[in-house]
Structures are given as structure tokens and as C-alpha cells.
Image (cartoon, rainbow, N blue to C red):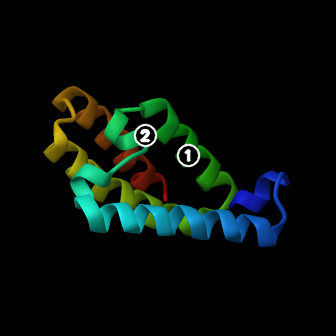
């Protein structure tokens, strides 16, 4: 995915992805998944989620179901952390709408 921007080589994109995943897993291990959650879901950032869904749908369609499933899991954590019901509902609609189009 990082390499598709052509800003990084495939090898560099793998190193970046490995570093991000390692940091995320270490943080979740230290403070728990709910507190460690970061990204557009916990921020209630609907525009970014929609942009992700659009790019994934157009470039890596085979990953759309996995992304959608991960976003549903992240949404449950974000709600537990205090995401507003309004933001949660809007995010759920966006995630579910992509499910109907898959």
C-alpha cells in the first residue's frame, strides 16, 4: 500500500509498515487496546475513513473486507473510550455502506 504512492520503494514500504505494526502492538501490549487505539476512528474522522474506503475500493479491492472488519473493531474500542454516539453512528454508516457495495 505504501509503495503504491510511488514515494517509497517496495522494500522501504515494508520497513515502514513493519515499524508501524511493531509500535502499535507494543503500545497495545503496554496500555491495552482501548487506550492504544489511534487513527481516524478514535478521532471520529469521517472524511479520512471515507478517503481510505475510496482508495482501497479503487486500488486494493481484495483488502476492503479486511479494512471494514478492522474499522468495526476499532469503532467498538473507540466507543468504549468515549467516542460520541453521533460520530460513532456516522462512522458506522460509512463502514456499512462500503459493505453493501462490496
Locate residue 27: give its quadrant.
bottom left
Q: Cβ–Cβ below 8 Å for labels 2 and 1?
A: yes
Task: Determine whether the residue tagged by mark 2 lies in a helix, strand or loop.
Answer: helix
Q: Position of residue 93 (x, y in %)?
A: 32, 39
Which percent across, then down, holds residue 58? 67, 53
Q: Residues within 10 Å of mark 1 (few under 14, many from 20)?
A: some
Label 2 vs 1, first from the N-terminus: 2
Q: Position of residue 52 (x, y in %)?
A: 55, 46
Category of crowding for the residue at label 2, using alpha-carbon neighbours closer than 10 angstroms: few (below 14), some (14–19), many (at least 20): some
Q: Is residue 7 above or below residue 26?
A: above
In three-dimensional space, the C-alpha distance between marks 2 and 1, rounded to whole angstroms, equals 10 Å
Residue at numbered disc 2: 40
Residue 86, which numbered label? none
Which is nearer the eye, 58 or 11?
11
Q: How far across and how far down the image is residue 37, in percent?
A: 33, 51
Quadrant location of residue 54? top right
**Residue 52 badge:** 1
Q: Residue at x 16, y 36 (%)?
A: 82
Amino acid at each position: 500500500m505504501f509503495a503504491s504512492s510511488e514515494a517509497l520503494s517496495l522494500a522501504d514500504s515494508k520497513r515502514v509498515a513493519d515499524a508501524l505494526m511493531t509500535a502499535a502492538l507494543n503500545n497495545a501490549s503496554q496500555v491495552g487496546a482501548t487506550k492504544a487505539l489511534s487513527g481516524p476512528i478514535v478521532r471520529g474522522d469521517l472524511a479520512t475513513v471515507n478517503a481510505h474506503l475510496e482508495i482501497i475500493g479503487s486500488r486494493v479491492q481484495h483488502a476492503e473486507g479486511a479494512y471494514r472488519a478492522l474499522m468495526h473493531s476499532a469503532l467498538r474500542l473507540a466507543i468504549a473510550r468515549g467516542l460520541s454516539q453521533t460520530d460513532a453512528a456516522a462512522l458506522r454508516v460509512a463502514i456499512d455502506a462500503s459493505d453493501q457495495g462490496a
